[in-house]
Amino acid sequence: MNLKLIRPPILVALLCCGLSLIAQSAPAGPPVPYASVSQLNAIIEPLQQASESAQADLGKLRIEKWKVDSGSKKQTLTNVESIKRNLQSALPEIIGQLQSSPEDLSATFKLYRNLDALYDVFGSVAELAGAFGSKDEFQALSNDLNAIERSRRSLGERLENLTASKEAELAQLRTQVKTLQAAPPQPPKKIVVDDNEPPKKPAARKKPVPKPPKPTPPAQQAPAQPTSPQQ
């Protein structure tokens, strides 16, 4: 069985970290294209099926019956429990993070790295099953391991394509920044003052018009007294 691991270049990992930091400070971009989401689903769905199948097959192992020393049996049991925890907890959590942000390089690389470690440990268990277990045990684990490997390869190709795309976006942004920096600054607006123009006279203030006094009502005269007749 070929257990050779295919690891991404170190440049990919460094670029993932750099682009992740830029994405955190940048405004939200356009929605993810439908083709990209479909491509990711085509990787995740078989991976989830392989995870369910692997958990079932690991539960059927009879490691205590293998004709191997007790130290190897104990180490294999530890590896099996580690694989189960990964498949039941860590893997679904990472997949959920990637589904919420399909083109996030950091989340994509995190899933790839998890599959890389999972493939390594799973491969050692499958090798021991082939050497000391039953034929059915080895065949079942071999099928699961191949399914995980296919998902890992597909995810590695997607990671490389995303990295190239993001690198091209960064190059375009750098070009735009250099263009803006090289452009001459706009001259400040000039304010022209005409010294020959006579100063404007201030508007004359209108004097308030006094109100006429109110007329005083005439005094009322006392009624005339009647005169007495002459005697």
Image (tube, rainbow, N blue to C red):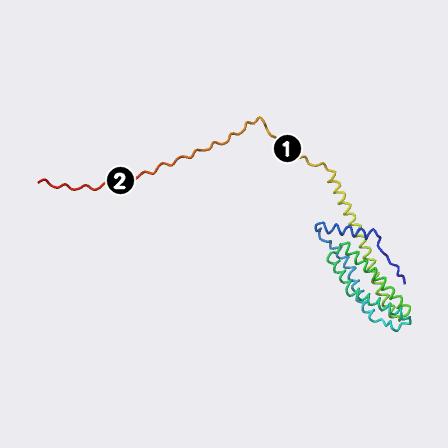
* Percent of width and height locating residue 133: 89, 70
Name the residue at 74% across, 59% down.
Answer: 97
* Percent of width and height locating residue 127: 89, 66
Q: Is residue 105 left or right of residue 203?
A: right
Q: Are marks 1 and 2 in contact (CB under 8 Å)?
A: no
* Tag shown at residue 190: 1
Name the residue at 87% across, 58% down.
Answer: 5
Q: Is residue 172 above or below residue 112?
A: above
Q: Amino acid at mark 2?
A: Ala
* Tag shown at residue 118: none
| Quadrant in the picture for residue 103 | bottom right
* Element on which disc 2 rests: loop
* Percent of width and height locating residue 71: 89, 69
Q: In this orientation, which residue lies closer to the viewer: 2 or 184?
A: 184
* Percent of width and height locating residue 186: 68, 36
Q: In this orientation, which residue lies closer to the viewer: 66 or 142?
A: 66
Q: CA distance from mark 1 to mark 2?
A: 76 Å
Seen from this angle, which residue lies furthest top? 196
Q: In this orientation, which residue lies closer to the viewer: 33 or 228?
A: 228
Q: Is residue 65 above or below residue 48?
A: below
The tag earlier along the polypeptide, 1 or 2, is 1
Q: Amino acid at mark 1?
A: Lys
Seen from this angle, which residue lies furthest bottom? 65
Q: Is residue 216 left or right of residue 181?
A: left
* Element on which disc 1 rests: loop
Q: Where's the N terminus, which quadrant?
A: bottom right
Q: Where's the C terminus, which quadrant?
A: top left
Name the residue at 46% across, 33% down.
Answer: 205
Q: Label 1: how many residues lie within 10 Å, few (<14), some (14-19) or many (20+)?
A: few
- Residue tagged by mark 2? 219
